[in-house]
Image (cartoon, helix red, strand yellow):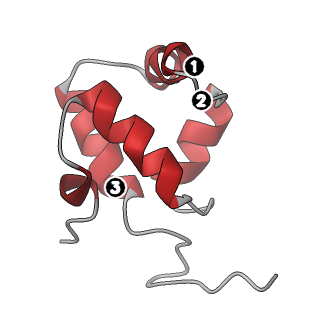
Amino acid sequence: MKIYKYKNGKCNVSGSKLKQLREDAGLSQEQFAAKIQLAGLSLNQKAISRIETGERVVPDYELLYFSKVLNVPVCTLLEYE
């Protein structure tokens, strides 16, 4: 499967927004990964880091977990600045 890069070589548009929301919630990447795991999705801190820097593709079902843990609508994660 070919991975197409978006802008500036990034593989997703939600990473920077995810980082902002995570930091606003006062969570480290490790704490966020733990909450995601408790919600039922197996992601570690390294995966969170790669998502936030745009190095990793984010499947749509992962956005559902992120929005649930951060208590925001999915569309908030897709807001691009």
Instruction: Decide which of 27, 79 is in the foreground and name it.
Output: 79
Q: Position of residue 78 (x, y in %)?
A: 27, 64
Figure check: 13 above or below 25: below
Q: Report the mark closest to the observer, 3 or 2.
A: 2
Query: Is residue 53 shown to the viewer in this render?
Result: no
Labels 1 and 3: the sequence-earlier one:
3
Instruction: Using residue 76 as the reference point, say whether residue 67 is left or right of it.
Output: right
In the rendered structure, find residue 16 and report the number of the disc placed on it: 3
Task: Name the residue tied to disc 2.
Answer: 41
Q: Amino acid at mark 1?
A: Gln
Q: Amino acid at mark 2?
A: Leu
Q: Secondary structure at mark 1?
A: helix
Figure check: 71 above or below 19: above
Instruction: Using residue 75 as the reference point, say whether residue 54 is left or right of it.
Output: right
Q: Position of residue 27 (x, y in %)?
A: 33, 19
For the residues labelled 1 and 3, the Cα–Cα distance comes to: 21 Å
Instruction: Decide which of 27, 37 is in the foreground and name it.
Output: 37
Q: Position of residue 44 (x, y in %)?
A: 65, 27
* Quadrant for the N terminus in the image: bottom right
* Quadrant for the C terminus in the image: bottom left
Residue drawn at point x = 21 percent, y = 59 percent: 75
Q: Are marks 2 and 1 in contact (CB under 8 Å)?
A: yes
In the rendered structure, find residue 59 and report the number of the disc placed on it: none
Q: Are marks 3 and 2 in contact (CB under 8 Å)?
A: no
Q: Position of residue 6 (x, y in %)?
A: 48, 84
Task: Name the residue tied to disc 1.
Answer: 37
Labels 3 and 2: the sequence-earlier one:
3
Residue drawn at point x = 30 percent, y = 39 percent: 67
Figure check: 76 above or below 31: below
Q: Secondary structure at mark 2?
A: loop
- Figure quadrant of residue 14: bottom left
